[in-house]
Image (cartoon, coloured by chain):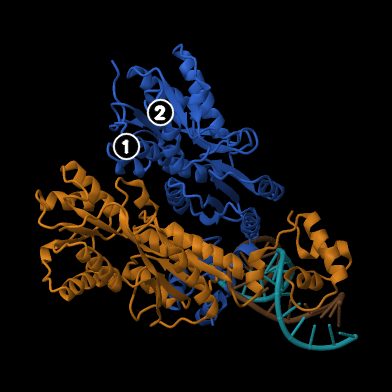
Chain colours: A orange, B blue, C cyan, D brown
DNA sequence: TTGAAAGCGATACCAC
DNA sequence: GTGGTATCGCTTTCAA
């Protein structure tokens, strides 16, 4: 049988109410009995029944997190950031992985919503409409991290539009004039739209008319990078390429290797994300690193602050880490 | 205000008890009213308050999962396996990431235990003793996945001892006589012990006396692989090396590249784990692939079956996937 | 087949 | 400071 505050109260000869006050550090009580009770609770191996606590309290301190199972290796970093902040501020994280399988997705989300949650954070999740409806119809706060959903729900992400300017400027400064963008051709997530537009506009700022053929690739996948090299053939019609995710860029790098294209001499690569993966390649990938841990922290602090409106858009900083995949063209 | 079964009951003109029976599919009720109630619940946007349900039921269907934040990229695969099975059998997963920071670890585990859990599954977690005590003193079922903890708690993993035989045999058949094992020198996790012993015994089976120097490296980290190559210098005193995790093997591969050691001609590499990472290298890593998804599924089914004793040890299959990192020596 | 009522464990309000 | 008590939402006997 599990131990309840009542058990503790009985043994200590005081009321359950007092035990509750002491164990939660709320209201008034004498430090003397408090000591005794805390000791007793510990000795008896007491664990709060959180379900009971949740039930009797109106406000919940649990934040649901939806993580896509499609292996985005930065999800861990965001979660880590969230977890640290949550720990610090006394919140709890309830993490749920969502499959692409929509049937299961709805099920998962519904079971999430069955816990009274303070908010639900979606990590780069490309939610299906049906699931999104479920989410919005339930009245929890929603927050999207690393994916912008303009004016629908608040979001925390990098400034994807500006990021492309940073990259294009960098490549331009290194003498590149012909550039491609791989893996951001989805019509769907706003991130892709912003990156495309940023890419095009940044080129225009340098007086370069973009070549629509050079924006290619839909899936955020290793294969997309491999395929891109195959598609454009040798010699490549551009001198630099931007991979819209680390995993894509690794595909580009290996695809180039397979086709005897030497990086960076024959092809320069800049990747977006800058996770640990970028350190595993030879040469090391030059990357615009997103601050995922910060996104996670901000997610929690903003939820705690209640400072979110559907129009809230928060950007975290990005850093350009130069590796060995960009050559200067003379 | 949130909608409760009482609200539904009122609107439908029946009792809350009936609504509960219908919505949980328990006990008797007429299918006719059931239809009506289900429809109504849906229309009203009802979500079960799981806390209340948990509180009133003795038995829980929630499985806690402890995942180490130290990026082991196979944790995802195990979780995916668990999640699929859990979904199928009607269980819920409560995933908690645990930091190496012990203070936080205890906190996290305690908050896990505050939910009444059916069981706690530890994924390759190297639990600190203090945390382990907390876990065992609370009366939940414990299960270790991908890490054996002989005779203390039940476990599901690969047969690490046999796996080393498979690898050594494979390398021996390819003509190798001098082999090293990198990243399994920890005294601590039993997995490391088993791998070392398997390695030594497998060599002995081929009449090879092992060289203690050739078992080296403690951390399961990229850097361990890099360092190993540096430590042994050129030319390497062995022709083949076994990396005790994919990330280590990638370190070995890049370390070799940096030292102008050609893989596989100058050095053969076999990696343990066989995650997607192995596909990202050039050459592709030859790997003994563990069946992580299966481990996850078995974890859930065995918890469901209640068939676990502290001495239970379940092995899943391993496959040797030949890539391009093993050469035949003549 | 359905309803009334008694919990489940913790919290919070209100007296004392 | 401390103790009684209603309450949260759901499940589950037990009667009807």
Residue D7, above or below B125: below
Q: x and y percent of residue A287 in the render?
A: 32, 59
State left or right for residue B118 relative to residue A288. right
Residue A25, percent across and down? Answer: 74, 72
The residue under the point 50% across, 73% down is A119
Query: Which residue in the structure is indicated by mark 2?
Result: B241
Tag 1 subunit = B
Q: Based on the displayed image, in which of its 4 quarters is residue B239 positioned?
A: top left
Within 10 Å of disc 2 (Cα), the crowding (few <14, some 14-19, many 20+) is many
Separation of residues labelled 2 and 1 (CA atoms): 15 Å
Give the x, y percent position of residue A155. 40, 74
- Which residue is rendered at x = 46% and y = 14% of the image? B208
- The secondary element bearing badge 2 is classed as strand
Q: Chain of mark 2?
A: B
* Label whose residue precedes the other's in the sequence (2 or 1): 2
- Note whether B304 is above or below C14 in the view shown: above
Check disc 1 and report its element: helix, strand or loop: helix
User: Where, by quadrant of the figure, is residue A24 drawn?
Assistant: bottom right
Q: Any mark on residue A183, and which?
A: none
> x, y (%) of residue A286?
30, 56
Q: Is residue B150 visible?
A: yes
- Asked if residue B144 lies left or right of residue A186, the reply is right
- Residue furthest front in the image: A330
Q: Which residue is mark 1?
A: B257
Q: Nearer the viewer, mark 2 or mark 1?
A: 1
- Mark 1 Cα-neighbour bin, 10 Å: few <14, some 14–19, many ≥20: some
Q: Nearer the viewer, residue B110 or A135?
A: B110
Residue B313 visible? The answer is no
Image point 56% across, 47% down: which residue?
A: B121
Q: Are marks 2 and 1 on the same chain?
A: yes
Q: Is A210 placed left or right of A294 in the picture?
A: left
């Amino acid at each position: 049988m599990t131990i309840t505050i009542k058990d503790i109260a009985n043994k200590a000869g005081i009321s359950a109410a007092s035990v509750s006050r002491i164990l939660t550090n709320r209201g008034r009580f004498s430090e003397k009995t408090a000591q005794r009770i805390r000791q007793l609770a510990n000795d008896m191996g007491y664990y709060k029944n959180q379900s009971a606590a949740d039930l009797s309290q109106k406000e919940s301190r649990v934040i649901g997190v939806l993580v896509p199972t499609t292996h985005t290796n930065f999800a861990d970093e965001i979660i880590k950031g969230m977890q640290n902040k949550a720990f610090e501020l006394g919140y709890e994280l309830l993490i749920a992985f969502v499959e692409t399988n929509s049937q299961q997705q709805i099920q998962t989300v519904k079971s999430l919503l069955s816990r009274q949650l303070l908010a639900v954070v979606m990590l780069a999740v490309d939610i299906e409409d049906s699931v999104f409806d479920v989410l919005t119809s339930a009245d929890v706060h929603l927050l999207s991290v690393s994916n912008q959903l303009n004016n629908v729900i608040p979001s925390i992400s990098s400034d994807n539009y500006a990021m492309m300017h940073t990259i294009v400027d960098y490549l331009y400064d290194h003498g590149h004039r012909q550039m491609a963008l791989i893996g951001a051709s989805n019509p769907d997530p706003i991130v892709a739209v912003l990156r495309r537009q940023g890419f095009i506009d940044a080129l225009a700022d340098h007086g370069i008319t973009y070549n629509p053929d050079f924006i290619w690739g839909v899936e955020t996948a290793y294969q997309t990078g491999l395929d891109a090299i195959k598609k454009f053939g040798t010699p490549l019609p551009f001198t630099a390429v931007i991979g819209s995710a680390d995993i894509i860029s690794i595909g580009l790098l290996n695809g180039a290797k397979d086709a005897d294209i030497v990086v960076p001499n024959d092809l320069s690569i800049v990747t977006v994300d800058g996770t640990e993966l970028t350190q595993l390649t030879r040469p090391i990938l030059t990357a615009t690193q997103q601050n995922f841990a910060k996104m996670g922290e901000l997610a929690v602090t903003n939820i705690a602050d209640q400072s979110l409106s559907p129009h809230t858009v928060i950007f975290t900083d990005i850093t350009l880490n130069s590796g060995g995949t960009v050559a200067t063209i003379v």
